[in-house]
Structures are given as structure tokens and as C-alpha cells.
Image (tube, rainbow, N blue to C red):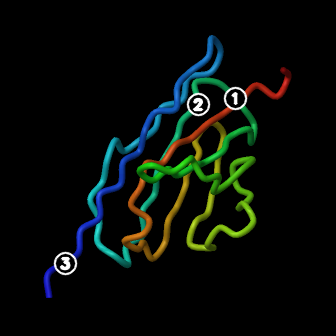
Amino acid sequence: PPWVTLLLFFMFSGSSSEIILTQSPGSQSVVPGQTVSITCRSSSSIGSCLNWYLQKPRETPKLLVYYASTRQSGVSDRFSGSYSGTQFTLTISGIQAEDAAVYYCQSWDERT
């Protein structure tokens, strides 16, 4: 049978006057069962102040991981977050067709 190809879009979440987030890759085509990593780099130190979301067409964004590595309740353990310094990674293991979505990283200034 032919491979089922997934297309995942990873989008830049925006920036403030102090923090710029750069997300990569821009998009990726994968097959079910693969492990995919999405990276988000911050222009300055933000500690663990980073969240990961996914959004499907005509749906509101869904929180996957907060504070860089804490999985939101009810989210599959196939999703995991990690970080080192200013580099943050969302890993999706055993990817499935239902995981096709737009993925966002989002940060904030904890001092505000």
C-alpha cells in the first residue's frame, strides 16, 4: 500500500520588544510512525516560560505542553517538551494522521 504522507506546519508565534522566537522547520512531510522534532529558539533567556500549541482547521488552539516540558492533562504521551538554554523542542513520537496541524510556540515575560 502507498505511504500516507502527513504535512505538518510549524508557525512563528510572533515577538515582543524583548523576545523573538524562531521556530523550525517551516513545514515537514512525514509518514505515520515517524518521530518529529520541532525547535523554537528564543533571542534571550526565558527560563522555562514557553508553551506549545497545536491548531487544526476551524478549531481553537489546543495547549500541548506548558512551562517547556509539562504535558497538559489529557494530551497523549506521544507529545513531549524539553529545553536547554534558549532552545526548546517539541517531540512527537509515533506520529499519526490526526497529528496533522499547525504547531505554535509561545512565550511570555514572567516579570509582567
Question: Decide: marks 2, 1 in contact (CB < 8 A)?
Answer: yes
User: For the residues marked 2 and 1, what is the alpha-carbon distance in whole angstroms?
Assistant: 7 Å
Q: Residue furthest top?
A: 17
**Dot 2 crowding, Cα within 10 Å, few <14, some 14–19, many 20+:** some
Relative height, residue 80 to residue 54 (above, below):
below
Residue with the mark numbered 1:
45
Q: CA distance from mark 2 to mark 3?
A: 35 Å
Q: Compared to 102, does 11 lie above or below?
A: above
Please name the residue shown 52% across and 43% down the image: 104
Tag 3 residue: 3
- Residue type at mark 3 is Trp
Q: Is residue 79 left or right of residue 39?
A: right
Q: Earlier in the sequence, mark 1 or mark 3?
A: 3
Q: Which residue is mark 2?
A: 42
Amino acid at dot 2: Ser
Q: Position of residue 82 (x, y in %)?
A: 64, 55
Q: Residue at x 75, y 66 (%)?
A: 73
Q: Nearer the viewer, mark 1 or mark 3?
A: 3
Using the image as rendered, state which of residue 11 and residue 84 is in the foreground.
11
Tell me if 70 is positioned left or right of 21 in this view: right
